[in-house]
Image (tube, grey):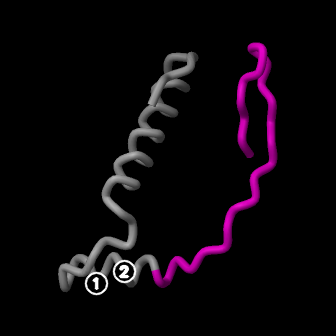
Amino acid sequence: MLIQLEDDEPVSTAVQPLPADYRAFYAGVRDMILTGAPSPVPIDQALMVMAVIDAAQRSAAEGREVAV
C-alpha cells in the first residue's frame, strides 16, 4: 500500500509487488561474499534504499515530510 499526502490528506494506492526469485538473490549474496562476485544489487541502489528507509523512519518519528 502506498500512502501519499494530497492537499494534506492521505491518499492510499494499492501497489502489487513484482515477482522475484529470492533464491537467486541470496545465491548472488553468497557468491559476492565467498568469491568476490559482483553484488546482486548495485551499491548505489542499495545506498538509495537505505536513505529512503532512514527518511521514512525520521518522517514517522517527527510526523512530517522528510526529503531524501
x and y, in percent, of residue 37 in the image:
24, 81
Is 3 on the left-hand or right-hand side of 62?
Answer: right
Kindly identify which numbered label has been placed on residue 31: 1
Residue at point 34%, 48% (across, down): 47
**Residue 4 drawn in magenta:** yes
Q: Do the residues labelled 1 and 2 touch (CB within 8 Å)?
A: yes
Q: Nearer the viewer, residue 55 or 7?
A: 7
Residue 43 lies, with reference to residue 50, above or below; the image says: below
Residue at point 33%, 76% (across, down): 29
Kindly identify which numbered label has been placed on residue 28: 2
**Residue 18 drawn in magenta:** yes
Residue range in magenta is 1-24
Q: Which of 10 and 62 is in front in this view?
A: 10
Residue 45 lies, with reference to residue 20, above or below; the image says: above
Find residue 27 and report its image quarter: bottom left
| Secondary structure type for disc 2 | helix
